[in-house]
Amino acid sequence: MESDAWSIPEILSDSVPFPEILVVSPTYGRFHGGSFESGATIEAGTVIGVVQNVGPEVDVVCHARGVFLSWLAWADERVSPGVPLARIAPLGV
């Protein structure tokens, strides 16, 4: 049975432009990402990592449903508020 819907690989190919969501750091500290791999579906509200500083660690939350594309920060990298940490392709738009 064939479907007219696009598959994820077609959406993610370089030849098909698509909007992307940048998940950014909420605070200063060292970034520690989760174990997401390219192509994984992420639901809105998913904690994708944490930023650790002197105080308690702060969750990094993806606020939209989408497909995880890539990390933009290294593990244990020092980050500031607003620094992009991950790229997400939105689903359901």
Image: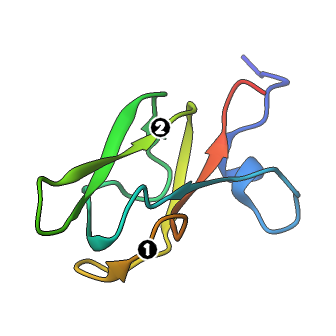
Q: Which mark is residue 80?
A: 1
Q: SS class of the residue under badge 2?
A: strand
Q: Is residue 90 left or right of residue 41?
A: right
Q: Are discs 2 and 1 less than 8 Å apart at CB?
A: no
Q: Residue 89 at what x, y percent from top left?
A: 66, 47
The label on residue 64 is none
Residue to which mark 2 is pinned? 41
Name the residue located 34 percent from the left edge and 48 percent from the top edge: 48
Residue 81, x across and y down, in percent: 47, 65
For mark 1, give the secondary structure.
loop
**Is 56 situated left or right of 42 in this image?**
left
The answer to whether 20 appears left or right of 48 in the picture is right
Q: Is residue 74 above or below residue 33?
A: below
Q: Quadrant of residue 78?
A: bottom left
Residue 58 x, y percent position in the rendering: 25, 50
- Give residue 66's quadrant in the image: top right
Q: Residue placed farthest to the front in the image?
A: 55
Residue kind at label 1, given as amino acid type: Ser
Q: Residue at x 12, y 53 (%)?
A: 56
Is residue 17 found left or right of 38 in the rendered image? right
The residue positioned 40% from the left and 42% from the top of the image is 61
Give the x, y percent position of residue 93: 78, 27
